[in-house]
Image (cartoon, helix red, strand yellow):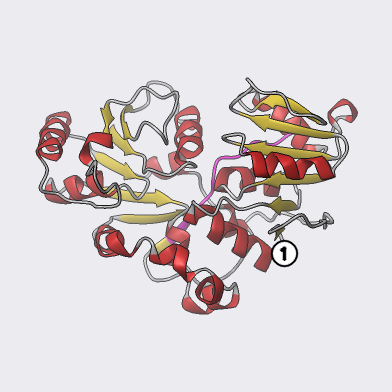
Amino acid sequence: MKILYAACNRKGAQLQLGRFLSAVAKGEHQIKLAGFNESCPGFYLDWTLDALLDMFNLDHISFDNDNLRTYFSQVKTFNPDLIISDLEIFSSHIGLVLNKPVWQVSPLLLYYGLNAVEKTNMGVYKNYSYIFNKQATIDDLIRNALMNADKKFIYSHFGDATSAELMEGFEWVRPYHVTGKTSIPCKHNVCAVTLRNEKKYINYLNKFSDTVLFSTNLDEEFAGVTLKDISNLVEYGCNLKNCDLALNQGFTDLLADAFYNNKFSGILPDFSQAECVINALYAEYLGLGKVIYQDEDIEALEIKSSDNKLEFLHEKLKGM
C-alpha cells in the first residue's frame, strides 16, 4: 500500500513519526513523508511543508498558494492509497480534493474527542482556554478536516487509563512506547526526558539527587545530572523502568513511556504546545501524574497501567 504520512508542526511530531516508522515492517508499505523542518529533525522528508506557510504570519493558513498547487500535483502523481495525517491541514485538504482516504492520527485529537464534561472537570475551560483559543484561526479548518476524515484516532495512552465516552466518530489508538526490565544497575531516583534541553526544566532537576536526563542534544553538560542519549532505547527503557519518578514535559510518547512502565509522571508542561497542556491536565485528573508549575516538591504515587486491547496504528493498517 502507498501511504503519505503528513506530520504537523508540533514538537512531539518527531516522536510519533519515528516510532511509527520503526513499527512498520520493512518493505510492507511504500511510505512517503511530508512535514516541517523544525518538527521533524533528522528525517528525510519527501515534501518539506514550510514553504506552504505565510512567511509574514506563520499562523495563517491559505489554500490559495502556488507552492501548495505544486505539492498537490506531486501528491496526485504519487497517488497514495491512504493519507495518514497528524492533524496536518494541507495534506488533509489535498486528500479531500483527491477523494483519498484520510486518517487523522494525533494526540491533539484528545481536545476534540473528549466530551465537554471531562474537559470541564479537568480545567481546560477554566484555566487554559487561552492556549486553545490560539488555535481559533485554524479551528474551522481542523474541524472540517475531522468532519471529512475516514478515521479519527486519538493517539494516546489515556485510552488504556479511562473508560470516558468519546465524541462520536473518535477512537483510541495505542501510542508507541518503550518499556524496560527490572535491573539494579539501571536504578536511579529520577529519570527525566527533554527534547530540546530547556533550561528551566533542567534547572528543576537540581532538586533531586541521582538524576539521569535523556535528551536529543548531548553537546551540553549540566551539574548534578547524568546526560544520556534518548535514541538508545534499551538504556532509556531500563532507566525508566527502574526509576522512582519520571519527569517530562507532557509530550504524549514520553508520558506513554512512563505509563506503560507503571511510573508516575512529574510534568513541567511546555506551555507553547497545546498537546502538552491537555496531556498534563488529563494525567493529573486521572491520577497518573502531577503538574509542576513552580519550584515545588513532588511525591511519586503508585500507578498501574491497564490493558484495554487497543491496537497500534500499524495494526490498524492490516484492516485496510
Q: Nearer the viewer, residue 25 or 159?
A: 159
Work out which quarter of the rendered image holds the C terminus and state it. top left
Across and down, in percent, residue 95 comes to 19, 46
Name the residue located 62 percent from the left edge and 43 percent from the top edge. 254
Across and down, in percent, residue 143 comes to 29, 64
**Type of the residue with mark 1:** Gly
Name the residue located 47 percent from the left edge and 61 percent from the top edge. 110
* Residue ranking furthest to the front: 56
Q: Which residue is mark 1?
A: 287
Across and down, in percent, residue 153 comes to 42, 54
- Whether residue 181 is visible here, answered yes or no, is no
Position of residue 116 in the picture relative to residue 237 (left or right): left
Count neighbours of disc 1 (C-alpha within 10 A) and say few if under 14, some if 14 to 19, many if 20 or more: some
The residue stretch that appears in magenta: 171-180
Tell me which corner region of the image, top left, top right, bottom left or bottom right, holds residue 53.
top left
Name the residue located 37 percent from the left edge and 65 percent from the top edge. 169
Q: Main secondary structure of the magenta part?
A: loop
